[in-house]
Amino acid sequence: MATVNRRQAREWALQLLFQIDANPVHDLTPVLRDFWMQQFRLRQDAAEERRALRGQKSTAPEQAAVEPETAAEKLAPPRIRDFTEMLVRGVTRNLDAIDDRLMRYTDNWPLHRMGGVDRNVLRLAIFEMFFDEQTPPVVIINEAVDLAKYFSSSESGRFVNGILDRACKDVKRPAREPVKPSSGARYSKSRRNRPAQAAGDNR
């Protein structure tokens, strides 16, 4: 199993939120199960391509027999899956309150006119800032800007940064220290083609 960190968990959470935003659902359980299976298959497909390039034997028949629960276990340890799912469930459960708060910082720019990536990056960050409080606000902003740049553009990164800078002024806790002990994982991996962050979440 490849080592993963909270940045990877936020990437997964963002992908899930983007999907749910486009296709709303009432029950997240099958969505999460299918998502973990899809991610596992994508990883295995990439591994198959590397084996083929090296002239090694395919393991495709073994992969086809993997159950969803086993696939999730092979993809990431429980603590990172739990953190990912906590973010997704937290945002969807508090969506109206998150959007109401977000509108305070967007100069009344309608959320539906934002790009899907920007909107869901901001929702995720607002949830972490005001509803979860595991992670220091400075780290939340850096992670959100990085996600916006990675999945959209540098312009999206600047847009997200400006809104979250405003939001951060309303946070009633230290900007660089978590309030509550983190329930997430403490693991590390750097993403390929990523700019280094001064205050990223590498746990």
Image (cartoon, helix red, strand yellow):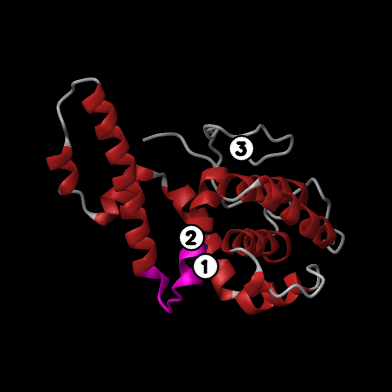
Mark 1: amino acid = Arg
Residue 85 - label: 2
Say which residue appears at 80% left-offset and 73% top-offset.
Answer: 104
Nearest the camera: 50 or 156?
156
Q: Amino acid at mark 2?
A: Glu
The quadrant of the picture occupied by the N terminus is top left
Q: Which residue is mark 1?
A: 89
Q: Position of residue 88 (x, y in %)?
A: 52, 63
Q: Which residues are magenta?
A: 17-29
Q: Is residue 179 visible?
A: no
- Of 115 and 120, nearer the camera is 115
**From mark 1 to mark 2, how far is it between C-alphas?**
6 Å
Name the spot of residue 162 as percent of width and height, x first.
80, 55
Q: Position of residue 6 (x, y in %)?
A: 56, 45
Which numbered disc covers residue 202? 3
> Mark 3 to mark 1: distance in Å?
22 Å
Question: Rounded to the nearest whole Å, what is the CA distance between mark 2 and mark 3?
Answer: 18 Å
- In this view, 40 is above or below 58: below
| Picture mark count | 3
